């Protein structure tokens, strides 16, 4: 069976809370899944993640960080634009879930 590849997108602070729960719940059922927690917009200012597993999956939007004068957590991956990253990943066969 092919491994799941899932993008969980969080553009708002409330969505970020749901997204973290979504990622944790998915990984309990599918521990080998590739999961990215993609954060942009107002959610970028709400990122306070201390779970090492979630941090390794965190993908932050450079545009959102710059617009809000934010510094990303060092463990996070930073992409130029969340919209581009989401589109490219979906083109590669990743599933998209908006939290």
Image (cartoon, grey):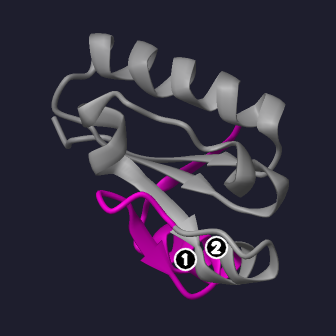
Pick whichever, 33 or 24, lies toward us.
Answer: 24
Q: Which residues are magenta?
A: 72-99
Pick whichever, 81 or 97, lies toward us.
Answer: 81
Q: In the drawing, does residue 7 fall left or right of residue 98?
A: left
Q: In the drawing, does residue 65 fall left or right of residue 30?
A: right
Residue 52's x, y, as percent? 25, 34
Element type at marker 2? helix
Element type at marker 1? helix
Q: CA distance from mark 1 to mark 2?
A: 5 Å
Q: In the rendered image, which residue does mark 1 sit on?
A: 85
The numbered disc on residue 16 is none
Q: In the drawing, does residue 32 fall left or right of residue 97?
A: left
Residue 84's x, y, as percent? 63, 83
Position above or below: 18 against 86? above
Q: Quadrant of residue 40?
A: bottom right
Q: Are marks 1 and 2 in contact (CB under 8 Å)?
A: yes
Q: Quadrant of the N terminus?
A: top left
Q: Quadrant of the C terminus?
A: top right
Residue 71's x, y, as percent? 55, 69
User: Does residue 45 show up magenta in the picture?
Assistant: no
Q: Quadrant of residue 87?
A: bottom right
Q: Quadrant of residue 62?
A: bottom right
Q: Residue at x 29, y 57 (%)?
A: 75
Q: Residue at x 47, y 71 (%)?
A: 89
User: Does residue 95 show up magenta in the picture?
Assistant: yes
Residue 93's x, y, as percent? 42, 64
Position above or below: 16 against 22? below
Q: In the rendered image, which residue does mark 2 sit on?
A: 82
């Amino acid at each position: 069976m092919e491994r799941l590849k899932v993008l969980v997108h969080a553009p708002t602070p409330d969505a970020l809370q749901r997204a973290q729960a979504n990622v944790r719940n998915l990984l309990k059922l599918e521990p080998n899944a590739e999961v990215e927690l993609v954060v942009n917009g107002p959610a970028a200012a709400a990122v306070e993640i201390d779970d090492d597993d979630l941090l390794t999956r965190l993908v932050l939007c450079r545009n959102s960080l710059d617009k809000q004068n934010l510094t990303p957590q060092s463990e996070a991956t930073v992409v130029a634009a969340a919209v581009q990253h989401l589109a490219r990943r979906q083109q590669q066969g990743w599933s998209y879930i908006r939290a």
